Image: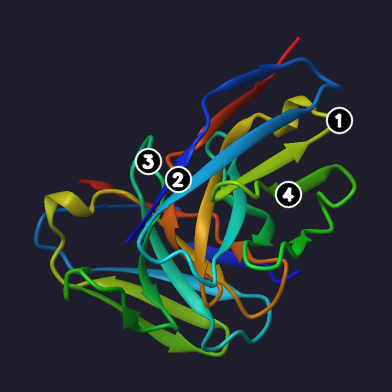
Amino acid sequence: DIEMTQSPDTLSASIGDRVTITCRASQTISPWLAWYQQKPGAAPKMLVHRVSRLETGVPSRFSGGGSGTDFTLTISSLQPDDFATYYCQQYNSYPLTFGPGTTVDLK
Amino acid sequence: QVVLVQSGSELREPGASVRLSCEASGDDLSDFIVHWLRQAPGQRLEWMAWINFDNGNTYSSPKFRSRVTVSRATSAITTYLHLGSLQSADTAVYFCARERGGTFISWGQGSQVTVSS
């Protein structure tokens, strides 16, 4: 199985901050990496697929990057609606696996 | 747009089984693959299995293969997840989700399964 890790576990930030979350895979998965946002009590919502392609309707302040085994999700200017937990997911091979999540909260 | 609606919460004793449902509606139900995933409290999402509505093919994670069955109803766009030999570690929210190229673009609202004696 491909193991996914994320850092940090929790990120405390203020409105307007630029924040970056890192995701690492245990083997090369490019470009099969997606990012999801999940709020408490809700289902996840896909933000980015194929490393850097924004899903329709996702604000342009979100961006994805990286290659090989190391990837990032950046929010250029944090907004109130962005406080949530973010998960990366690899779909290079089965079983599909997710990272442990990064919670973005208010500093 | 596709909407997925899941069945409600379930409480089971250890050793029992549970069947969850996920009904799809919308205007684009062709080439339809639905996955089942779960999320234990405070844990990461865990992929379990998928089913292809067009041909009924299924595939499941080796972790669950011995005790999971995914099926579909022929009369409606509904998929079922049957999970047997439940233990407390199976307490989780179970999601169905529509696939697009290996990612999950539409999700059900989740079904809470609690395993407790």
Judge if badges 1 and 3 mark residues of a common chain.
no
Report how far apart the C-alphas of labels 2 and 4 lie in the structure. 16 Å
Q: Give the structural element (helix, strand or loop) at label 2.
A: loop
User: At 61% across and 75% down in the image, what residue appears?
Assistant: A25
Q: Give the structural element (helix, strand or loop) at label 4.
A: strand
Q: Is residue B56 above or below residue B18?
A: below
Image spot of residue B107 (x, y percent): 44, 52
Q: Which mark is residue A72?
A: none
Between label 3 and label 4, give the one nearer the viewer: 4
Q: Hey, what amino acid is under mark 3?
A: Ala
State the residue position of label 4. Answer: B70
Badge 4 crowding class, 10 Å Cα cut-off, few under 14, some 14 to 19, many 20 or more, is: many
Camera-side residue: B15 or A1?
B15
State the residue position of label 2. Answer: B108
Q: Hey, what amino acid is under mark 2?
A: Gly
State the residue position of label 1. Answer: B85
Report how far apart the C-alphas of labels 3 and 4 lie in the structure. 23 Å
Report how far apart the C-alphas of labels 1 and 4 lie in the structure. 15 Å
State the residue position of label 3. Answer: A42
Mark 3 falls within which chain? A
Residue A99 is left or right of residue A40, and the answer is right
Image spot of residue A96 (x, y percent): 65, 66
Q: Hey, what amino acid is under mark 4?
A: Val
Report how far apart the C-alphas of labels 1 and 2 lie in the structure. 24 Å
Q: Give the structural element (helix, strand or loop) at label 3.
A: loop
Between label 2 and label 3, give the one nearer the viewer: 2
Q: Give the structural element (helix, strand or loop) at label 1.
A: loop
User: At 17% across and 76% down in the image, what residue appears?
Assistant: A60
Image quadrant in which you'd find residue A106:
top left
